[in-house]
Image (cartoon, rainbow, N blue to C red):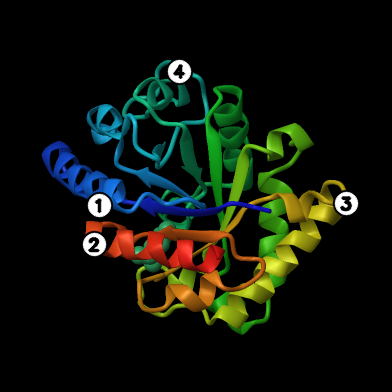
Amino acid sequence: MRKKIIAGNWKMNNTVSEAVKLVSSLTKKIEKNPPSSTGVIICPPATALASVAPLLKGTPIEMGAQNIFWEEGGAYTGEVSAKMVKNAGAKYTLVAHSERRTYFKESPTVINKKIKLALANKLKVIHCIGETLEEREQKLTKDIVLNQVEWDLKDLTPQDLKNVIIAYEPVWAIGTGKVATPEQAQEVHGFIREILDAIFEPGTGKKMTLLYGGSMKPDNAAGLLAQPDIDGGLIGGACLKADDFMKLIKASEAASK
Ligand code: PGA
C-alpha cells in the first residue's frame, strides 16, 4: 500500500516570522490530531528553512525546499544549492514546478540535472508535471506528461525512483480555482503509472507515489483523494492557512480508511 501524502508549497509567501507563526499553529493542530496514514510535508521559502526546521522536530511534518540549483556550488549569484537546503533541514525539494518551467524557462535538461543532484545529496524529489490549458484543448495532455516523465527522469535507476514523488499539476488548475475533476485527474494518474512501467520497468508505476496539485481545497479534496491512483495532494493556496491545511490532512486520513 502506498502511503498518502499532503504537501504544502508555500511559494513566495511568508517572512521568517510569518513562517514561524504558521508552523507553530500547524504543529499545535497536528499534535491534537496526529495523522496515522498520511505523510505531511511543507515547503517554505529558502529564507525560512533554517528557522522552521527546529519547530518540526518531534512532529510528523517533514520539510522540503521549493527549488535548488543544478550545480553543487560556486559562482552562481543568488542561487541556493542542494547541500545548503539539506543542511538547513530540508528532506525534500520540489523540482520543475510549472511556475519554474514558465517563468524561469527550466528545460528538461536542467530539470534532469536538478533531480540527479538532489538525489546525490540525499534529498527526495517532488517532481511536478502537467499540461497547459492550450495543450489540454489540443488533446496533448498524454503526450506532454509522457515527455516530461521520459526526459525529466532520464537515466534514473529503480533505486533513484524510490526517492521520487510525481505531482501531476495541470497548469490550468494551479492558483486558478479551476480544479480538475476527480475523473480527469484519475485518468492522467492512471496513465502516468502505465508510462512509468513502459519507460522504466514493469511494476514501477504501482510503487511510486503520485500527487495531484491544482486548486485542491478542503471542499474538493475528498473526491480527488478517493481516486485509486491519487496518493495525495500538492497544495498551494490552501496550505497558507493552518486550518485549511489541517482539513486537507484530515481529508487524506479519511480517504485512507
Ligand atoms: P494551488 O497551487 O493549490 O494554489 O493551485 C498548487 C501548486 O502550485 O503546487
> Would you say residue 141 is visible in this rendering?
no
Answer whether labels 2 and 1 touch (C-beta < 8 Å). yes
- Marks counted in the figure total 4
Image position, residue 210 (x, y; %): 61, 57
For label 2, the residue is 243
The C terminus, quarter of image? bottom right
Q: Residues within 10 Å of mark 2 (few under 14, many from 20)?
A: some
For label 4, the residue is 73
Q: Amino acid at mark 1?
A: Lys
Q: Mark 2 or mark 3, which is nearer to you?
A: 2
Of mark 3 and mark 1, the one earlier in the sequence is 1
Q: Mark 3 or mark 1, which is nearer to you?
A: 1
Of mark 2 and mark 3, the one earlier in the sequence is 3
Q: Does dot 4 land on a helix, a strand or a loop?
A: loop
Q: Does dot 1 land on a helix, a strand or a loop?
A: helix
Q: Residue at x 48, y 61 (%)?
A: 233
- Structural distance between the alpha carbons of marks 4 and 1: 38 Å
Q: Mark 2 or mark 4, which is nearer to you?
A: 2
Q: Residue at x 26, y 44 (%)?
A: 27
Q: Mark 2 or mark 1, which is nearer to you?
A: 1
Of mark 4 and mark 1, the one earlier in the sequence is 1
Image position, residue 160 (x, y; %): 70, 34
- Structural distance between the alpha carbons of marks 2 and 1: 8 Å
Q: Is residue 226 above or below residue 76?
A: below
Q: Residue at x 19, y 42 (%)?
A: 24
Of mark 2 and mark 4, the one earlier in the sequence is 4
- Structural distance between the alpha carbons of marks 2 and 4: 38 Å
Q: Mark 4 or mark 1, which is nearer to you?
A: 1
For label 1, the residue is 29
Who is closer to the viewer here, 23 or 251?
Answer: 251
Residue 53's disc is: none
For label 3, the residue is 202
